Amino acid sequence: WAPYGDTFLDGAWTFSKGLWKSAYVAASDGVLISHVVPQIAYAGAYPTAPLTDATHGGFDVTVRVHLDSDEAYDGYELSITSDWGGEASATVDVPAGASAHEVALPRADGVRLWWPNNMGDRPLYNLTVATAGAAASRRVGFRAFALVTGNDTNPEYVAESVNVSGTSGHGMRASGAPLKIFRRGMECS
C-alpha cells in the first residue's frame, strides 16, 4: 500500500492511498517459494590476466531457496534447472513457517562472462527453482572480481597471499584487468 496523502491538483483530489505496484494471487500446495538467492563464486585459479570465455575456470553455484509453509512437510522435492545446463534436485524437510535450504549445482564451466557497459557482452542465464506447486526464476551473470593490493603477477606474492587479509601495497584490479576510475571528468588508473 502506498502512503496516504490528501493533495489537491488541478481541481481534483489526488489521494495516494491504495495499491501502487503489481499485485497477484499465488496458489501453492502449502509451500511457497518466498525468494531465491543464487550464490556464485569463481572456481578457477587466481586470475593474473584478464579472464575470457575460453580461459576462465568456471563458477560454483549454490542456490539458497527460502520457503514459507503453513505446516511441516517431510521429503519435499526441490528441482533446479538453468540455461547453462546445470541441474540439481534435493529432498528437504520443510518446517512450518519460514525456512531456507541450499542446493549446489554442478560447476558452471561453459558460461560466457558478463562484462560492464562498453566492455563486452552482458549475457544473463535463467535459473529456475520448482516445487510440486510453485516455481521461481532468476537471471544471473557470471563475473569474477578481486581487489588486489599488490603485485599479483609475481607467483611468490600470489602463493604468500592465499587466505591473507590485506597487504602493504595499494591498487585495484578487476579480474586481472586494470580498473579505470573516473573522477570529475578525469580518467585515473
Image (tube, rainbow, N blue to C red):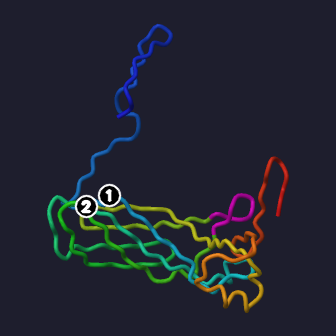
Residue sitting at x 50%, y 10%: 10
In the image, residue 94 sits, relative to residue 28, either above or below, namely below
Residue sitting at x 19%, y 76%: 75
Residue sitting at x 38%, y 79%: 88
Where in the figure is residue 184, as x and y percent of width and height?
81, 47
- Give amino acid for label 2: Ala
Crowdedness near tag 2: few (<14), some (14–19) or many (≥20) residues, C-alpha within 10 Å:
some
- What are the residue bounds of the magenta stretch? 114-122
Looking at the rendered structure, which numbered label has been put on residue 98? 2
Q: Residue at the far top: name it.
A: 11
Q: Are marks 2 and 1 in contact (CB under 8 Å)?
A: yes
- SS at badge 1: strand
Q: Is residue 165 magenta?
A: no
- Give amino acid for label 1: Ser
Where in the figure is residue 136, as x and y percent of width and height?
37, 61
Question: What type of secondary structure mainly makes up the magenta span?
Answer: loop
Kindly identify which residue carries mark 1. 34
In the image, residue 186 sits, relative to residue 159, either above or below, namely above
Crowdedness near tag 1: few (<14), some (14–19) or many (≥20) residues, C-alpha within 10 Å:
some
Decide if residue 140 is on the left or right side of residue 27: right
Q: Which numbered disc, 2 or 1, marks the residue that appears first in the sequence?
A: 1
Decide if residue 39 is on the left or right side of residue 110: left
